[in-house]
Image (cartoon, helix red, strand yellow):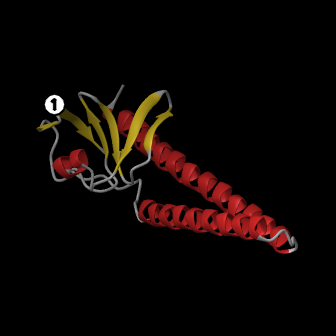
Amino acid sequence: MNDYFYDRCYVKLKQKIYNHFLQAINARQEMLQQVLNDLKESGANETKSTAGDKHETALAMLQIEQANTRGQLQELLLQKAALEKLDPALAAPVIVNGSLIKTSRGYFYMSVAMGKAAVEGIVVIALSPQSPLGQKLLGLKKGAMVRVNDIEYTIESIE
């Protein structure tokens, strides 16, 4: 297989990984928005009730749940904005925000902390640059080695 073909497939993988995490954020955003809509509807129904203390407690619980859900949605929107700033076509010789990193311990996508995902049969961890591993990986080149929590990572490739 020639290098051009390999590079083109690899770039496609990075784009697919980016798309996967963006779709996951969008799906979670829709879900949280639906929860907020449902809570709003429940609150409207609750205000029609005249059950005294029980009514007040239920209304207070709904308001707390709405505030928690709004907080989750706000945090998610920040993650989405950070992810959307990345250019999946960008390739750098050192690890930067947006890099797809193949290490001796697996694949990492330096972006936002979103956990593991399987894309094209490859398990990828979306890693925040603020995480302990993310901080140590930033700026490193292929062949570099880093140790976090007694686990050694050797950088095999960067895209």
Residue at the spot 42% in from the left edge and 65% down from the top edge: 85
Question: Quadrant of residue 43 in the image?
Answer: bottom right
Percent x, y for residue 88? 41, 53
Q: Residues within 10 Å of mark 1 (few under 14, many from 20)?
A: few
Question: Quadrant of residue 14 in the image?
Answer: top left
In the rendered view of the protein, which quadrant contains the C terminus?
Answer: top left
Callout 1 secondary element: strand
Seen in the picture, residue 57 relative to 147 is either above or below; the reply is below
The answer, for residue 101, to whether it is visible in the render is: yes
Q: Which sits in the foreground, 89 or 6?
A: 89
Percent x, y for residue 117? 48, 37
- Left or right relative to 12: residue 50: right
- Left or right relative to 11: residue 159: left
In the rendered view of the protein, which quadrant contains the N terminus?
Answer: top left
Residue matched to label 1? 152
Q: How many marks?
A: 1
Q: Which sits in the foreground, 125 or 19?
A: 125
The answer, for residue 94, to whether it is visible in the render is: no
Seen in the picture, residue 42 relative to 13 is either above or below; the reply is below
Percent x, y for residue 36? 69, 64
- Left or right relative to 151: residue 26: right
Question: Quadrant of residue 100 in the image?
Answer: top left
Q: Which sits in the foreground, 26 or 88?
A: 26
Seen in the picture, residue 92 relative to 68 is either above or below; the reply is above
Residue at the spot 67% in from the left edge and 54% down from the top edge: 31
Residue kind at label 1, given as amino acid type: Glu
Residue at the spot 58% in from the left edge and 68% down from the top edge: 67
